[in-house]
Amino acid sequence: MSYLVGVRLLWAFSFSLIGVYLAGQVDPYFAVLVRVSLALLVFLPFMRRLPWQLAAKLSVLGAVQLGLMYLFYYQSFLLLSVPEVLIFTIFTPVYITLLYDALQLRFRYRFLLAAVVAVLGAAIMRYQGLTQDYWIGFIVVQGANLCFALGQVGYKVLLEKQPLTVSQHQVFGWFYTGALVIALPAWLILGGSQYPDSSIHWAVLLWLGLVASGGGYFWWNKGATRVSSGTLAVMNNMLIPAGLLVNILLWNREENVMTLLAGSLLLIISCLLCKPRSATITGAANGQTN
């Protein structure tokens, strides 16, 4: 759980840096390429030779969770306003619970309920109205949500069914290798001509690549293997209150405090719904947090 909380705070800070220093100033596809490349460089010294099946699975997960997710995500900004993109990203928790239960051939209604409550909490904090003809953009954002959910669930299930004989940081370079396979051609085909032209741009890209992406996605996916699918689902929407707090504390931006508190309360309730009901269940969860 501590991994997920820490990464959400890290990404909330990083998200604000993107909005202030990169958005509209640096080509997003080039930014993704730099982030993925730097993240791969971080883990390159630790990479170990793996059975080709395992290396392929990790690469596919990286290609989906990072590569394809970013393609959908950045295309959505061509179809929607920023507030619309943000509000449509809140459905990821539902996808995570449904995907994980489908792969496990079971249904945990409490986790689905927790995910729905998390969606409602996020909606209260982020809803600002919608424009007309937003359905195509909505579908594109859901593509990004599904890719991000598939990557998390896939990594969690993979490590549950195929325990590693080495540490996770020794195999995670394959994850970024898969992401790079998508990011490089995406930049070549869709990239624009806006490149970093200041030390601030490069400093932010270095931070995003080495820390937010390099460390962030590793810690997030590692944290995903240590919590239940319900907790993982709920934590996906914790970026919203964390991001709003960063806006208030660092950038002195005005936010609706009442909706922030109400939405945060619902997110806390959704976390409580994911907790085991008794000490017996808690003991079982320590052995297997599915």
Image (tube, rainbow, N blue to C red):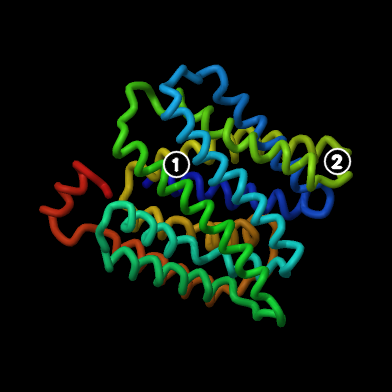
Numbered badge on residue 21: none
Which type of secondary structure does the marked residue at label 2 adopt? loop
Q: Is residue 143 above or below residue 53?
A: below
Q: Position of residue 268 (x, y in %)?
A: 38, 65
Number of numbered discs overlaid on the protein picture? 2
Say if residue 271 shows up in the picture. Answer: yes
In the picture of the structure, the residue carrying the numbered disc 2 is 195
The answer to whether residue 61 is left or right of residue 206 is left
Q: Is residue 174 above or below residue 208?
A: above
Q: Position of residue 23 (x, y in %)?
A: 77, 53
Q: Which residue is at a point 39% across and 57% down the rendered structure image?
A: 99
Say if residue 2 shows up in the picture. Answer: no
Q: Position of residue 233 (x, y in %)?
A: 41, 58
Q: Nearer the viewer, residue 280 or 56?
A: 56
The residue furthest front is 53
| Separation of residues labelled 1 and 2 (CA atoms) | 30 Å
In the picture of the structure, the residue carrying the numbered disc 1 is 221
Cβ atoms at labels 1 and 2 below 8 Å apart = no
Q: Is residue 100 above or below residue 110?
A: above
Q: Callout 1 environment at 10 Å: few (<14), some (14 to 19), or many (20+)?
A: many
- Is tag 1's residue or tag 2's residue first in the polypeptide sequence? 2
Quarter of image, res 199: top right
Quarter of image, res 40: top right
Q: Callout 2 environment at 10 Å: few (<14), some (14 to 19), or many (20+)?
A: some
Identity, as a three-letter code, of the amino acid under mark 1: Asn
Identity, as a three-letter code, of the amino acid under mark 2: Tyr
Q: Which residue is at a point 46% across and 38% down the rendered structure image?
A: 219
Q: Is residue 203 above or below residue 24?
A: above
The answer to whether residue 201 is left or right of residue 251 is right
Quarter of image, res 242: bottom right
Q: Which residue is at a point 46% across and 18% down the rendered structure image?
A: 48
Which type of secondary structure does the marked residue at label 1 adopt? helix
